[in-house]
Structures are given as structure tokens and as C-alpha cells.
Image (cartoon, coloured by chain):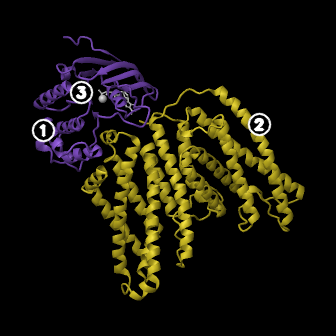
Amino acid sequence: MKVVKNSIKYFFKTDWSKWIIVFIFLISLLSLGAYRDIVDLFTALLRSYSDNSFIAFIFLILAVNTLYLYKTLFYSNNYLIRTNNRFKYLKYTLLTNLIISFIYYLISFLFVLLFALFKIKGGIDLNIIFNYGILGFLYFLYHYFKVFIILFVILNISRYILLTFKSLTYVAFIFILILFIINFNFPISLDPNAIYKFNILFPYYFFPLNFNSLKVDATYLLGELCILYSFNIILKNYYLYIKKVKFKLLNLKFLKLEYYNFIKDNIKYFILFFIIEAFMILTYSFLTPNNNVMYFSLNLIKAQNDIFIILNKLFSILFIIFIIILNLKYIYGYGKAYLILRTDNKKVLFFVILSIILNILFINLFLLFIGIIISFIRGLNISFNFNTFVNILFLEIYIGLLINFIFYNKYRILCFFSLIFIILFIISFKLQLINILLFAIILLLSIKLLKIQDME
Amino acid sequence: MILKINGLVKNFKNESVLNDINYEFVSGNIYGILGRNGSGKSVLLKIISGLYKQDQGKVLFDEINYNDSNDFPKDVGISIEDPSFLNDLTGFDNLELLASIQNKIGKDDINKILDIVNLTEEKDKKYKKYSLGMKQKLSLAQAFMENPKVILLDEPFNGIDRISVDKIKNYLINLKKKDVLIIITTHIKDDIAGLCDVLLELEDGKIKNYEGSKE
Ligand SMILES: Nc1ncnc2c1ncn2[C@@H]1O[C@H](COP(=O)(O)OP(=O)(O)OP(=O)(O)O)[C@@H](O)[C@H]1O
Ligand SMILES: [Mg+2]
């Protein structure tokens, strides 16, 4: 595409683009700190690109550059209108931004390589390259591109935030993402013991180097990409939605009627759920002899290796997903699963979001109730962790809203997989990661959705 | 070609800007829209070109409604307020970059248009070194360059010298003869008095024929 080529050509003529290279040089100096007591070149390179602060700075630079691009090159009405269509605008600008970011990323590699060669004692030992280096090289290559892909997908999310909301939101959002990347614990839970370590780029098991760890890593990468990509889709549609689609009048009466039917149906399923859940918990408490720590449903999170508990968790999550889909079916009327982001009315939207939140709240209170009753019957000691409860409550609500937002779109399979991965993440105790990521994006979306105004 | 505007309403927050605009613009004419500062002239042009969305009503280009989808109307040249060119590029490069989006015209066409707005001498100067009038000329060149069928100009003659204005006006009259639809807004009637076939006035969110236009 000629415009992409031209944009890149002209972009690199600006003074700004040269300053960015200077900053990348300075940041590459940071990576020097990672080279202590390392003799192998690829390990050194790998360390640099696994260093969270280094990656965070690279991301920051790319984000600032994106901001610049959208405030200059892509900003003008003259550019926008010539694309004939907002999809095309998004496509051209995406491509341009991708290539420019990648060029910068390559430049960062050149600097890092330079410093690494300079710093490593004895230079490159051919022996090491042959015995250890090939795998190291492959792993580095994989890791290098992985980091870029993830950074770029996140960058793309931030691009939609920039286009959709005000610049201030963008800055706040970038701040949150940076916190992520540098492995800060962003405490939602007030209990210091409940804060788990998380790391969005998962670089912590690259030692010892073997293909097994590569496999695990690749699987996680896939999961991350699925989740991030779903956010991309949501945000893109949301952007197009606020730019163009209008609201029409709502028939509230019809909606109320549907909602009564829905509650009636829900109660039926609640009872079913109650029975299954009670059965599971009872079985569990009979099977395990010394269960003085009794908890129920999703909240049995501490006992990791117990298949039974994992099954129980999965069951609860699937049930919640089921309830939400049921919810959608009703609220959008006659099982038509209306497209939420194209829904005709903001009141419907409000209604859906509210009912999802209420539903999930009810389900959890129900579970709490069941747990207490069963504990009384069995004479068990209950340990109720309020923070975990709230965390999980939020998590479920996010999942609910997420399903709600992505339910309609044409990438259903992808959305399905991201949900599966969310579930996997939950099982692997990456609770904080999910919570914060979902919190940042979905909260923004829902707040904005509720008070949609003219965005121009 | 006919540009039909039906019951157009636009509010910002609680401020009503356009309130039930109905009008039919026919190609081969130059329309002038007069109005005070803040009367909504720029907003009207932005809605026509699809940059803003209306609250109610329709904008139909030969019965095609672009505004409800994510499309922009085809073959529309606009020069509306803040043109935002790239500071670090020359005037020519700026135009070339924009032209490469649709890839319809080449360097020669760009040079031709620069000549029409009297900007040939400064075309290799960086945009940040342009004077107010030069910036305005570049914005006009950009609107004219791809042979659009509809041209929307917001205060086009701001800061432009007499000689260039006359040249541009002649060009517009030529375009009109080639069946192009041209809409010009301004708050200074004298700017466009001799040029326009129809003079309109935007007041209190309504559009009407300008009284005393036949002085
Ligand atoms: N993006 C926006 N957000 C909120 N209000 C806006 C926006 N754009 C325009 N307005 C309001 O709409 C009204 C009309 O603005 P507009 O720019 O169309 O006026 P105008 O007729 O072009 O004035 P001028 O002669 O000064 O160019 C103004 O009161 C302005 O405050
Ligand atoms: Mg104006």
C-alpha cells in the first residue's frame, strides 16, 4: 500500500523519529545491568529482553510514539476522509504503526547486541555456540519475537483506547500497562498475603533451557494472545460503535416481561445448581478426613493439587457462563442474541450489565449460604476469606461482561478460546493478572457505555 | 448530483447547534452559507462530510446515505478548520502523503494544483515555516487536488491575498461549469458576494435564504 510506504518514509524524516532512536539508545544502556556474570552471548541477549524494566521502557517509547503518530500523521480530517471508511483508516494506521514500531524494536536489538558484544568477556566462544548456542539462539529468536508480538497487541489495545477515549485516559491506561509489565503488584485485594506475583510476559522459567519450557511458554503465549486479541476486537467494535451507531427508542415494557421470564428460568437452574453443588461439597467433606479448612465452590483456591477442587471450580465457572448466556438469550429477546455493541438502546445495555452483575452476586451469595448450611450440618470449621470472595466476585463479573461484550461477534471461536484460557489462568492461580487486566478495560468500557455522549 | 439534507439535528451536550435543517444542494452551483461565529457552519460541513454524526436526520448524496455506516462520502474535497498538516514536511510532501491514500493522482497533478493556489514558490518549504495565508492555501490545494465532485470550504479566503483569491475564485467558477457542487461558509459576506449563485444564512440552527442577497 502506497500510503503505508509513504507514511513510513516521511515519518523517518521528522526530528521526532530521530529523538526516539536516541531514547532507545539510552534505554539499551539499561540492559547492561543484566549482564553480570554471564559469558554466553545469547543468554545475555535473552536476559535483556526478559528484563521487565527494559521491556517496560521499550513499550513506553512505542506507546508515546503511537500517541505522536495519532496526534500528527493520522490526526487530520484530510487523512481520515480520504480512506473512505473507518475500517480502512484503522487498517492503514495499524500497518504503519506496526512497521514503525518493528523498526524501532530492531534498532533496540542492534544497540543491545552492540553492548553485549562489548561487555561479554572473551567475546563469542565458538564452543559455546555449538554446544549450547543453537538452542540459546533459537530460544532467543522465539523470545524476541514473542515480546514484540505481545507488546504490539497491547499497543494496539492502547491505540483503540486513544481513539475512543480522551488522551488523559490513554495516559492512565499506559500507566497501568507499565505497572503490569514491570511486575508491580497492583493491589486490588487489601490483604497483603493474597497478592500473588504475576508477570504478563512470563519470562521467569527460561532457565533451565530446554524445549519443554519452550512448549509451556508457547502455550501461555497463545493464551495471552487470545485474551489480548479479544480485547482488541471489543475495543475496535466499540470505537466504530461510538463513532457511528445511533440509539433508538426502547420498548421497556417488553423488556420487563422478558426479564420476569428470565428470573423464573434462572430460579430453576439455581435449584439444579444448588443440588449439584451440595452434592459435590458433601462428597468432598466425606472423602477428606481432616478438612478443618472448609471452603466452597470457586473459593477453594488454596488447595492446588486437588483434582476434585479444580473440577468443582470448573463446574462453577461453566455454570456462570451458562447463566450469562441464558441471560443474553432472554434480554435480547427470543434467543436472538442481539449484538450488544450494536444494541439499539443504552437502556438495554444498562439493563444487561446490571442484570449480569446482580446475577453473579446472587449466585455467590447463594453459594455462601449453601456453604454455611453444609458446614453447620457437618459441624465443620469455616474459614471465610472476604478478600478472596470479593476478588472472585469481581472476576466472575468481568467474565460475565466479557462474554457479554464478545458474545455476538464473528470471532466466536476465538472468544471461546480466550474464555477457556481465562479458566486455565484461574486454575493456575493467575488471579491478579486477570483481575487487573479485565478491570482496566472492562470497567472503562462499561462506564463509558452507560453514559454515552457525543464523542466529537 | 444532488445533496439532500433532511431534518438534520445536532446537539452538543445540552447545547443545540443545528435544529431541523432541510435543504437540497444541486451540483453546478456555488452555495455560500453565512452565519455568525458559533452559528454551526463548521459543524454542518463536518456532518455533511461524515466527520461528525448527526443526532437526527439524513444526509443523502444522490440518495445514498453514508452517514449511518462507517463510510465517508466519496469524491468530497474538504477544507474545514484546523487542517493539521505535518510540521516537519514540506507543503508538497504533505500533499503527496495525502494523495497516496487514494493513489488517484501523481506529482504533476499536485504541482498543477499548487500553481492554482499560488503556492508553487513555497512548495519546498517546511510547513512549520509557512505563514497563515500559505497554510490556508495548502489546505485549499488539498481540497481541490483529487478532482472531487463535491467541495466543502470553511472560511476559505482567510488570510489569502487579493491576487490569489481572484485566481482561486476563477478556478471555482471553472469547476462549477464542470458540474461540481461547491459549498462555502463564511461570516464575511463580501468575501463571497460575487462568487455564489445562492446565498444562505445559518441562524438559530436553521438554514434560510439570505435576505438582501440581491443588492
Ligand atoms: N466538538 C465540539 N464539542 C462541543 N461543542 C462544539 C464542538 N464543535 C462545535 N461546538 C459548538 O457548536 C457551536 C457551533 O460551532 P461551529 O464551529 O460550527 O461554529 P461556526 O459557525 O463555524 O463559527 P466560526 O465562524 O467561529 O467558525 C459552537 O457553539 C461550538 O461551541
Ligand atoms: Mg467555523
- Residue for badge 3: B180
Residue B40 locus on image (x, y percent): 35, 25
Query: Spatial distance from mark 1 to mark 2, Cα to Cα?
Result: 74 Å
Secondary structure state at the residue bearing disc 3: loop
In this rendering, the answer to whether B86 lies above or below B67 is below
x, y (%) of residue A307?
Answer: 74, 65
**Could you say whether the residue bearing mark 2 is in a helix, strand or loop?**
helix
Q: Which residue is mark 1?
A: B115
* Badge 2 amino acid: Lys
Determine if the C-beta at disc 2 is less than 8 A from ligand 1.
no
Which chain is represented by yellow in the image? A
Q: Colour of chain B?
A: purple
Give the distance between the C-alpha atoms of the residues marked 2 and 3, in whole angstroms: 63 Å
Disc assigned to residue A264: 2
Which dot, 1 or 3, sits closer to the camera?
3
Image quarter for ligand 2 equals top left
